Amino acid sequence: MSNWLVHGGAVLEGTVSVQGSKNAALPILAATLLVEEPVTLLNCPAIRDAENMLGILKSLGCSVKREADAVTVDSSTASGFVLPTALSGELRSSIFLLGSVLARFHEADAPYPGGCEIGNRPIDLHLWGLKRLNAQIEERGGRICCKGGNLSGAVVDLEYPSVGATENIMLAACRAAGETTICNAACEPEIVDLQQFLCACGFRVHGAGTPTVVIEGVERGHGTVFRVMPDRIVTGTYLAGAAVTGGDVTVTGTQPELIETLLGKLSECGCAVTRNADSVRVRAPKRLRGVGFTGTRPYPGFPTDLQPQLFAALSTAEGTSVIAENVFESRFRHAQELRKMGAKNRILDRTAIITGVKKLHGAFVTAHDLRGGAALVLAGLAAEGDTTIQHTERIERGYERMDSVIGALGGTVIRKENGIDEEEKTR
Ligand code: UD1
């Protein structure tokens, strides 16, 4: 476990470039197994989730090399189809490997995936989709055992546009016989990036970004060099940081059009937003205004992954704001931590009512999940006094060198490895 100490009273100002997207890189890394030749990913973020995914690929026999932001995976030497329990338990996205391992080895054995604690995260849609492609799946002793000697294309009508299920089915369908059509597919931009990667490797996929994705199976793909898209959630996090600290932040190397919903909310809060082709600037007023209602939705709706950061900003905005979390059932654990910092909020089932206070104060808080943890960093920067955040390893699942990025913007985050658990402290 690690802790961070965040100095309060910061005003974030300056320009930072954004890392590659976690949610694009993870399924693309899983997809490297479909290609029995070396694949190089540029702009591959150096974050715990990506390192864990690379660890799993190595344990399956792939050779992996990282040079700065370029990661090369050669899966020609891979032979294993059993996913390691400990590493897969760390990473929900290990579930993507089910589709690609099955497509490559006609067999896959995986433990139930881990990841953030943001509610019950079933994988029924993933398994249902793979079964539609003719995989035989048994759940035994906490493991998922799949056999797929004859994967064949099918129409897969998703009951809900799950991002992960859409990607997993795309991966399994790439080498299946015939055509697969995914209906009610998720439309997230990271799915478009996955499609672009797959096409660059010679697979035949189209329709990503719309609710209908079509995959024509081919026997095998070929190696490529591919640049992972910028991370829209990290972009939004640093812009929300400008808003909550009364600052002025420009994020470069990004795609502002992918976070229009957040930019709209920040404008409503009174921020001045300037969009350029690949950069975006947010200048905050002295005090933000609250926004009436925000509900999270699948893309192009307001992203659930930016809900905690908006929550932190609204905690000091004038007036009352309401946020409904429609995607995950239990994604308000940051609310109780923000209350320790003086925030006023009430949670009624999946709705949060936030009454902005003038100032938050430093406190000892816990990052229960990745984005909730990032929200606490933003709140800590804006607060009076210092904040200690425990379990920051959860933030490092998705943010590359967050302490240095915030340092470049004039804030201070100090790492304290092997921090002391709050409960241990009181024992
Ligand atoms: C992905 C993102 C995550 C983001 C989420 C929603 C990655 C690596 N992660 O997660 O950052 O918060 O999309 O935008 O890309 N569900 C089921 N059955 C399933 C699958 C999902 O009921 O088989 C439910 C989930 O419990 C959840 C909702 O569907 O309530 C959305 O989940 P999903 O879109 O699958 O999110 P992930 O792919 O897990």
Image (tube, rainbow, N blue to C red):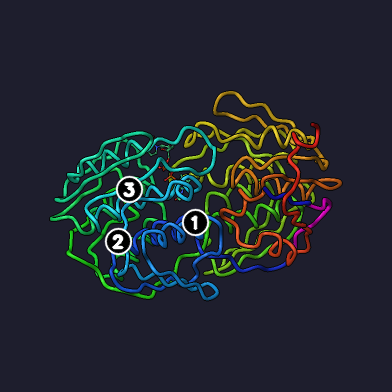
Number of residues whose C-alpha sits closer than 10 Å to that of mark 2, classed few (under 14), some (14–19) or many (20 or more): some
The residue drawn where x is 70% and y is 30% is 345
Sequence-earlier tag: 2 or 3: 2
Measured Cα–Cα span from mark 1 to mark 2: 19 Å
In the image, residue 324 sits, relative to residue 171, either above or below, namely above
**Kind of residue at badge 2:** Ser
| SS assignment at label 3 | helix
Do labels 2 and 3 touch, CB within 8 Å?
no
> Which percent across, then down, holds residue 421?
73, 40
Q: Decide if ligand 1 comes within 8 Å of the CB at mark 3.
A: yes
Q: Is residue 374 left or right of residue 107?
A: right
Residue with the mark numbered 2: 79
Q: Amino acid at mark 1?
A: Asn
> Label 2 vs label 3: CA separation?
25 Å
Which residue is drawn at the image coordinates 32% and 38% (left, top)?
125
Task: Give the mark toward the camera: 1 or 2.
Answer: 2
Q: Which residue is mark 1?
A: 52
Q: Does residue 340 appear left or right of residue 189 in this picture?
A: right
Amino acid on which the number 3 mark rests in the picture: Thr
In this view, the mark in front (1 or 3): 1
Residue interval drawn in magenta: 6-13
Secondary structure of the residue carrying tag 2 is loop
Residue 348 percent across, percent down from the top left: 60, 23
The picture quadrant where one finds residue 61 is bottom left
Query: Is residue 79 on the magenta stretch?
Result: no
> From this viewpoint, is residue 231 visible?
yes
